């Protein structure tokens, strides 16, 4: 078994971080290093999937649940519009290999990718 991910340790209360929302299978926290006025992470409770490609292949309903929670959080914490990012692979900036969605919202830049 590999070491528990940082997100599992947060979920289990070993590392302090407020859980701002949760469903049966998914939870959300604030990113410790925000890149937007609202920057949340939506994370499956299971550590089984390393990235969104594995998740989509293995449990598409869980991916749908993540997107639903992202949508609710964007409405609660911003104006409802949001950008959803799944870094996939170290070369794309992924540092935690427990799949998670970055939810960016609130006064994002004009460019299509935020430039
Ligand atoms: P990745 O780079 O894998 O796409 O995203 C990992 C994210 O987790 C980063 O944006 C990073 O700031 C965030 N992060 C890393 N450690 C912690 C932590 O201990 N608490 C919180 N709230 N976020 C963290």
Image (cartoon, rainbow, N blue to C red):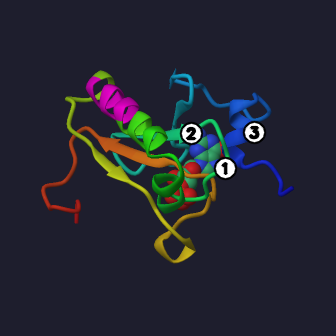
Mark 1 Cβ and ligand 1 under 8 Å apart: no
The residue where tag 2 is placed is 44
Residue 83 within the magenta-colored segment of the rendering = no
The residue where tag 3 is placed is 9
Dots 1, 2 in contact, CB < 8 A: yes
How far is mark 2 from mark 3, CA to CA? 13 Å
Q: Residue 95 sits in which quadrant?
A: bottom right
Dots 1, 3 in contact, CB < 8 A: no
Tell which tag, 1 or 3, sits nearer the viewer: 1
As drawn, the label of residue 73 is none
Q: Residue 61 sits in which quadrant?
A: top left
Residue 8 sits above or below residue 109 on the image: above
Residues drawn in magenta: 68-75
Q: Looking at the image, which residue sits at the far right? A: 1
Question: Of 38 and 102, which appears nearest the observer?
Answer: 102
Report helix, strand or loop for mark 2: strand
Q: Position of residue 90 (x, y in %)?
A: 56, 73
Report helix, strand or loop for mark 1: loop
**Badge 1: residue crowd in 10 Å (few <14, some 14–19, many ≥20):** few
Chief SS of the magenta region: helix
Residue 71 within the magenta-colored segment of the rendering = yes
* Residue drawn at the location 83% of the way across and 57% of the way down: 2
The residue where tag 1 is placed is 48
Report helix, strand or loop for mark 3: helix
* Residue drawn at the location 36% of the way across and 39% of the way down: 67
> Looking at the image, is mark 1 or mark 3 earlier in the sequence?
3
């Amino acid at each position: 078994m590999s070491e528990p991910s940082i997100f599992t340790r947060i979920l289990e209360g070993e590392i302090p971080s407020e859980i701002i929302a949760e469903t049966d299978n998914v939870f959300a926290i604030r990113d410790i290093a925000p890149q937007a006025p609202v920057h949340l992470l939506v994370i499956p409770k299971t550590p089984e999937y390393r990235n969104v490609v594995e998740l989509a292949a293995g449990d598409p309903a869980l991916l749908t649940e993540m997107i639903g929670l992202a949508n609710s959080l964007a409405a609660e914490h911003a104006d409802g519009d949001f950008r959803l990012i799944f870094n996939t692979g170290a070369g794309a900036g992924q540092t935690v290999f427990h799949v998670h969605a970055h939810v960016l919202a609130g006064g994002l830049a004009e460019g299509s990718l935020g430039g």
